[in-house]
Image (spheres, grey):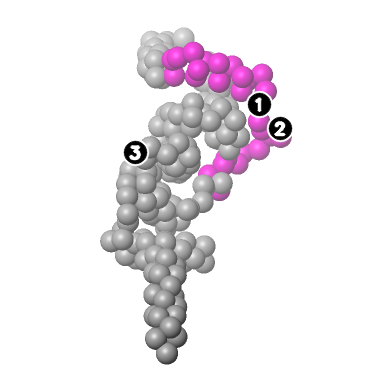
Amino acid sequence: MGLNYMKKNILIIFTVLILSAWIDPFKDEVEKGNSSYKSGNPKEALEHYKEAEKHAPDNKSKSILDFNRGAAYYLMGSYDIASDKFKNAIASENPEIQKKALFNLGNSYLKEKKYKEAVDSYIKVLQIDPNYDKAKKNLEYLLKKQDDKNENKDGESGGDKNQEDKKSGKNNSSADGEKKMKGIQTKNLLESMKNKPVRKQKGKGNGTKYLEKYW
């Protein structure tokens, strides 16, 4: 009788331990948020991420939440808020989170037509992972866009002072941009992209539709 009682208690304790291991409110709320996001309901997803934050065990988990929130705000078209969330996620010490957050940040900037900032973001992505094709495609798109713009300006007629002022302003702008793109790794990266472009076919599209997914 006593032996059976002990076995019963051990079974109960074991069951409680198993159930406790299964119950993870942070993971549960994140999964619910991800499901809502996937279903096209970003507002509902944000509510779940807000609840998950109460149970976030560490900074990495908080970075994941910021990343997911950024994706939700991006889906809502709130690109400025999405950018802020992706910036928070970049602070993570996890290179994979940093890489994907930088890529999505570049896409947010691209949506806002902040092309200079977008280029900087994609370059930083490729400094972490030089083989990141989606970032290469978007960077190629922006560089080609800038080349086309420069060609159109070069083809304009006129040699008056206003035209010279425009060229001078363009040159100053280019010089500022080049300073930020200095560094052996960046130069090698851009040279490699010229020699081996990722985009095989011409097209006007860019990779913003390839927003990196949530965790």
Instruction: Determine which quarter of the picture holds residue 10.
Output: bottom left
Magenta span contains residue 201: yes
In-image side of 21 versus 203 (left or right): left
User: Residue 87, position in %: x, y?
Assistant: 35, 40
Please identify the quadrant where the N terminus is shown: bottom left
Residue at the limit of the structure toward the left, as seen here: 54
The image quarter in which residue 143 lies: top right
Q: Amino acid at mark 1?
A: Pro
Q: Is residue 54 above or below residue 207?
A: below
Which secondary structure lies at badge 3? Answer: loop
Q: Are marks 3 and 2 in contact (CB under 8 Å)?
A: no
Tell me the SS state at disc 1: loop
Q: Per the image, is 41 magenta?
A: no
The residue at which mark 2 appears reads as: 200
Q: Which residue is nearer to you in this view: 103 or 201?
A: 103
What amino acid type should be assigned to the residue bearing mark 2? Answer: Lys
* N-term mark: 3 or 1: 3
Circle 3 packing at 10 Å, graded few (<14), some (14-19), many (20+), is: some
Q: Position of residue 194 (x, y in %)?
A: 63, 20
The residue labelled by disc 1 is 197
Q: Position of residue 44 (x, y in %)?
A: 39, 67
Residue found at x 39% / y 86%: 2
Question: Is residue 26 shown above or below 120?
Answer: below
The residue at the point 40 percent across, 32 percent down is 117
Q: Are marks 1 and 2 in contact (CB under 8 Å)?
A: yes
Q: Quadrant of residue 165?
A: top left
Mark 3 → mark 2, Cα distance in angstroms: 34 Å
- Residue range highlighted in magenta: 181-209
Q: Is residue 148 above or below residue 55?
A: above
Q: Is residue 58 left or right of residue 171?
A: left
